[in-house]
Image (cartoon, rainbow, N blue to C red):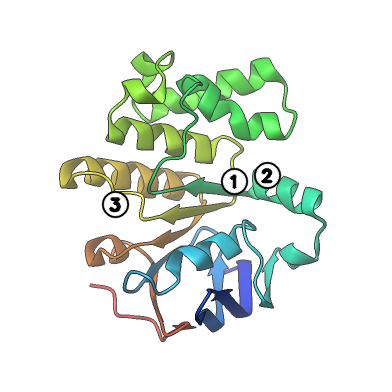
Amino acid sequence: METLLTAVNLYKRYILPHKTVHVLQGASFTVGVGERVAIIGRSGTGKSTLLHLLGGLDRPDQGEIRMDDQSIYALRSRARSLLRARQIGFVFQSYHLLPEMDVVENVLLPAMALGENHARARSRAQELIALVGLADRMTHTPLELSGGEQQRVALARALMNQPRLLLADEPTGNLDRDTGTQILELLFGLSHQHQHALVIVTHDPQVAARCDRVLRLEGGHLLAEAPVA
């Protein structure tokens, strides 16, 4: 399998008033093109921190992350932001939609970051919104949507620039079981259909079991692959 993303020897610590917390201590792994990888572990072990590093949202204290052999943190800030906008889509537990914008405007945001033609981008945003089952909600604001509907909008936004890598941080954590199952069906179905690589942070073994590989983060280290049920 062709390698898309490589993380090498990642270290990350947070200095607090009375102690230093070592979150990552030499984490390394790869993600192949179109591969689905689950990161599991207890709350507070650094799973979200790892995802932020992979997506260029935070900088490791040591180590390197490469996408297509390009070192992400060797890039200047503007170039890294452009790479993130073109290549990476994020799905967060808390949706992170802008409340003053309607559904279409929220989904459009990644394309606007790249200066895409507005009419073309708007047409694609509407297609994605329909694809996630919200064709009748395009003019609604996030506060007019349920949690499951907001997460559908977040998924459409993540797909807006046709990224090669999707990073999902507990995407069903704020949803009930039935709604979460629907979101997972969309997430896994669309990532498989379009061959997006997927790295998903989860505490749910049933979610992890749907992935090609499962890695456990413990004590700052990514341990040997856990068996997939």
Q: Nearer the viewer, mark 3 or mark 1?
A: 3
The CA span between labels 3 and 2 is 26 Å
Q: Position of residue 227 (x, y in %)?
A: 29, 80
Q: Residues within 10 Å of mark 2 (few under 14, many from 20)?
A: some
| Res 139 → quadrant | top left
Residue at position x 52%, y 27% from top? 106
The CA span between labels 1 and 2 is 6 Å
Furthest-right residue in view?
Answer: 76
Report if the CB atoms under discs 1 and 2 are less than 8 Å apart.
yes
Q: Mark 1 vs mark 2: which is more N-terminal?
A: 2
Q: Mark 3 vs mark 2: which is more N-terminal?
A: 2
The amino acid on which the numbered mark 1 sits, given as a three-letter code, is Pro
The amino acid on which the numbered mark 3 sits, given as a three-letter code, is Gly
User: In this orientation, does residue 71 appear?
Assistant: no
Residue at position x 75%, y 29% from top? 115
Judging depth in this view, the residue of 147 and 7 nearest the camera is 147
The residue labelled by disc 1 is 163
The CA span between labels 3 and 1 is 23 Å
Q: Where is residue 226 in the image (x, y as percent from the top left)?
A: 33, 80
In screen coordinates, is 210 left or right of 27?
left
User: In this orientation, does residue 192 appear?
Assistant: yes
The residue labelled by disc 3 is 173
The residue labelled by disc 2 is 86
Q: In which quadrant is the C terminus drawn?
A: bottom left
| Res 41 → quadrant | bottom left
In screen coordinates, is 10 left or right of 213?
right
Label 1: which secondary element: loop
Q: How crowded is mark 3: few (under 14 residues within 10 Å), some or many (20 or more)?
A: some
